[in-house]
Image (cartoon, rainbow, N blue to C red):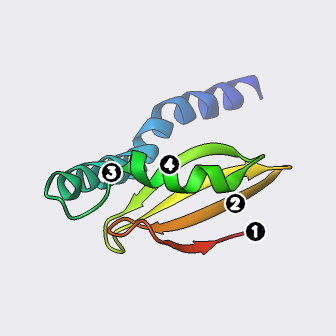
Amino acid sequence: MKRIFASLLAFGLVAGPIMAEPAFAQRRSEQGEARREMSAGNILQLREIEARVLPSMRGAEYLGPAYDSTAMAYRLKFIKDGRVMYVDVDARTGKVLRRSR
């Protein structure tokens, strides 16, 4: 039994990083795309968008952003009272598109 557990643990340590790589690579490419769009003047700086949204989320802890290059939108993630909330913002205009509650 210990041998099986040790084998599974070893497999998890080896396969875990390999399986996580596509998500990491996707996140890095989205970040690069956001940087290129911002440099080209097509989207607002993330700091500017955060400055517009964060004051309206009093009492919530800001967890961070994600950029969707297809929609040209940022999704800002918050947590308050154990509930995760998202605010989707148009990266070109800074307009809030949707708030989850």
Quick check: 87 left or right of 100?
A: left
Viewed as shown, does residue 36 lie left or right of 85?
left
Q: Amino acid at mark 4?
A: Ala
Q: Mark 4 near mark 1, Cβ–Cβ under 8 Å?
A: no
Give me the C-alpha separation between circle 2 and circle 1.
Answer: 6 Å
Indicate which disc, 4 or 1, sits on the residue closer to the N terminus: 4
Across and down, in percent, residue 43 comes to 27, 62
In the image as oriented, which residue stretches furthest toward the left? 40
Q: CA distance from mark 3 to mark 4?
A: 10 Å
Q: Which residue is disc 3 drawn over?
A: 45
Tag 2 and tag 1, C-beta contact below 8 Å: yes
Query: What is the secondary structure assignment of the residue under circle 4?
Result: helix
Q: What's the amino acid at mark 2? A: Met
Question: Which numbered disc, 2 or 4, marks the residue that appears first in the sequence?
Answer: 4
Please rate how many residues cluster around mark 4, counting C-alpha atoms within 10 Å: few if below 14, some from 14 to 19, many from 20: few
Can you tell which of label 1 and label 3 is closer to the viewer? 3
Q: Residues within 10 Å of mark 2 (few under 14, many from 20)?
A: some
Which amino acid type is shown beneath numbered disc 3? Gln
User: Residue tagged by mark 1?
Assistant: 101
Q: CA distance from mark 1 to mark 3?
A: 25 Å
**Quarter of the image holding residue 94?**
bottom left
Q: Which residue is mark 2?
A: 85
- Looking at the rendered structure, the secondary structure element under dot 2 is strand
Q: Residues within 10 Å of mark 1 (few under 14, many from 20)?
A: few
Q: Where is residue 2? Give x, y as percent.
A: 75, 23
Judge left or right: residue 58 versus residue 9: right
Tell me what residue is drawn at x 62 percent, y 34 percent.
Answer: 8
Q: Marks 2 and 4: CB-CB under 8 Å?
A: no
Q: Nearer the viewer, mark 2 or mark 4?
A: 4
Q: Is residue 44 shown above or below 59?
A: below
Q: Which mark is residue 51?
A: 4
